Amino acid sequence: MGTTTLLSFEEFERLPDEPGKVELLDGELIQLPPAILKHMEVARRIYLILVRAVAGAGNSADLGDVYFETGYKFSSRAWLQPDVSIPYRDQPRGVYFESAPALAVEVISESNTAAQMDRKMKVYLANGGVEVWLVYPDTRCIWIYREGHAEEFESVLRSSLLPGLELDLTQLFD
């Protein structure tokens, strides 16, 4: 049985750059291999769809621009990098965004564990996130988590955060 070395955010920031995705969750270093092309294609499609949806929402939504692979610092022991995200329009920021985005989208890969994704989803929601989308390309569905509610979408996704958005999952996953 292995042991987990816990890191502070300052120690995390000093780690050398390596291929793949690195996050800090409750002080635990989470290292993932570089994303495969299928993962990145799905994330890119979601990004482009959300850019149009946010532009269509105009000033009525309290949402900022859409970001791809951008870091969010939660505390001295957590830094996460969702595949796609939409921060709040006036979200505090320094070197990174502070706290959770309004929307965090995580495209699930084989290297993601259920326990890690559950912990990440809870961190996003506990720190001000409105929605967390867990996107499952292999099963062609998306789970949307909101505070106290989870809903699975298998054909057309609708989001309370982005009224009017109707995302055809057949087109997303083809």
Image (cartoon, helix red, strand yellow):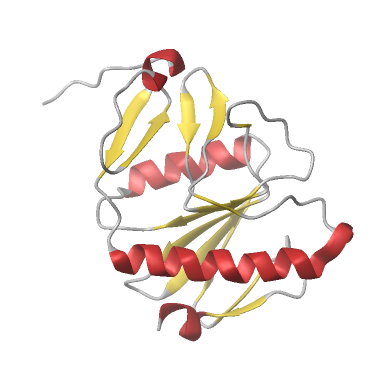
Q: Quadrant of the rendered structure where residue 53 is?
A: bottom right
Q: Position of residue 152 (x, y in %)?
A: 52, 69
Residue 104 visible, this orientation: no
Residue 120 visible, this orientation: yes
Q: Quadrant of the rendered structure where residue 61 is?
A: bottom right
Check the image and name the residue furthest to the right: 60
- Would you say 146 lies left or right of 6 here? right
- Would you say 168 lies left or right of 113 here? right
Q: Position of residue 62 (x, y in %)?
A: 82, 50
Q: Position of residue 42 (x, y in %)?
A: 43, 69
Say which quadrant the C terminus sits in.
bottom left
**Looking at this view, is 48 or 120 the one in front?**
48
- Identify the residue at horizontal 59%, vertical 27% (top origin): 95
- Identify the residue at horizontal 48%, vertical 48% (top origin): 69
- Identify the residue at horizontal 51%, vertical 17% (top origin): 76
**Looking at this view, is 38 or 117 the one in front?**
38
